[in-house]
Amino acid sequence: MAQIAVIGTGYVGLTTGACFAHLGHGVVCLDVDAHKVARLNSGEIPILEDQLPELVKQGMTSGRLTFTTETAEAVGGAEFAFLCVPTPQSESGEADLTYVEMAAREIAPHIPRDSVVVNKSTVPVGSTRVVERAMRRSDVHVVSNPEFLREGTAVHDFLNPDRVVVGGDDQAAAMRVAELYAGTKAPVVVTDAASAEMIKYAANAFLATKISFVNAVATICEGVGADIRDVVRGMGYDKRIGHDFLRPGPGWGGSCFPKDTTALLRIAEQADYRFDLLEGVIAANLGQFDRTAERIAAGLTAGETVAVWGLTFKALTDDLRDSPSLEIVRRLLKKGLRVQAFDPTVSGNLAVIPEVVITDSELRACDGASVLAVLTEWENFRWVDPSEVANRLSTRRVVDGRNLLDRSVWRSAGFDYQGIGR
Ligand code: NAD
């Protein structure tokens, strides 16, 4: 079993650390956020992620998982150091590599010779070179190992990946990284660094394309009287298409798709290719936010209130980064509407949009509102009694941006129910 350092304890880093410890490796997780490390050391998990509390506890009890803010302690005895730091979108649209370079510079003086630095952050083609240059250590290997986990099912995805991708110019170092995943029994794609980096961007852009495509088809369904739910069922049975990611909604978002699609446009530009298709996918997504907001706001005048169910970018996570719900909320506020929202993971106030009134239940969000909008697919929303909602709203109107609610039940309760694409 190997000794691993994980740099950055966010959604990817903490999952990586806990899962590698679960697979039997020794793991030290490093973060610059001292408060986060103190919480982790006291057994508190700073993010919502299924199975993660159990795995972290198991790792800490076994002694295979520890947390620190001290770089030397984390990497001094490491055979592998996984970089899991943010790569946000820069002003020009490219991935900002500041955190990656900083982390590489910090670990360089402490990491043993012949160890492997593994870039798990999503980074543009050529970033292994950036890490090599930042480290100035010719006796250390740098390998790319992009991560494909989904928030909400991160532990499951890490331990049961569809595939593991490892890319490096030194194939022996890449194979050493691939072996760390032996316990997951996943197919492994070992390739060069540029191809590994490209696989991650191409995969995310393809998934975003699938959603924008289905949202466009949903809009056409509305115009021709077809039901998108049956349309995607019929499409999905085709093995070349598949059922996954064929669900229409208010638009895609989250901490990865928006920045990664924009970064791929810049990568394409640098390769002298104008990626019109992907530009169209991004434009279609912005159009979907606009269309959903218009639908919710239809017939309302400034000062009226919209009840919003769901703020996170998807269910089962507490991550609000680039959430479609927030995109739509911003559009509603711009129209002079008020927003009263409930999300199971948000309490107090919403720092990113303080104008939103946060309530502590689905029904309280509806008090005095003119319309209800469902924007995140939290399962609990399905089971709220429409007659109780009707008692709180001034008009029986619901816009179900996730096709989550039972349309016939809501219509029987007297609601003007509008879903997406049906
Ligand atoms: P995050 O923001 O949740 O966590 C990043 C962590 O890194 C933070 O705790 C931060 O304090 C820490 N950090 C920053 N600089 C550091 C340094 N120099 N040393 C030590 N710690 C440092 O980020 P995330 O969502 O886990 O994403 C990390 C990377 O993984 C990004 O490139 C992202 O695109 C990619 N990725 C994310 C997901 C996802 O679902 N979140 C999935 C696949 C890939």
Image (cartoon, grey):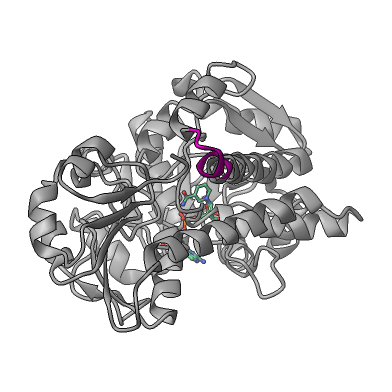
Question: Residue drawn 30% across and 82% down?
Answer: 355
Question: Which of 305/21 is in front?
Answer: 305
Q: Quadrant of residue 17?
A: top left
Q: Main secondary structure of the magenta part?
A: helix
Compared to 324, does 351 lie above or below?
below
The magenta stretch spans residue 221: yes
For the point 24% across and 54% down, which residue is it?
45
Location of residue 239 with respect to 376 vertically, above or below: above
Q: In this view, does 246 lie above or below 46?
A: above
Which portion, as a residue range, is magenta? 220-226
Q: In this view, does 128 lie to the left or right of 361?
A: right
The answer to whether residue 114 shows anywhere in this view is no
Please tell me how many numbered marks the rendered image carries. 0
Q: Is residue 363 left or right of residue 370?
A: left
Counting from the top left corner in percent of width and height, residue 273 is at 89, 53
In the image, 90 versus 359, the foreground residue is 359
Judged from this view, the residue extending furthest toward the right is: 272
Q: Position of residue 258 (x, y in %)?
A: 58, 58
Percent of width and height locating residue 303 = 29, 83
Which quadrant, please, contains the C terminus? Answer: top left
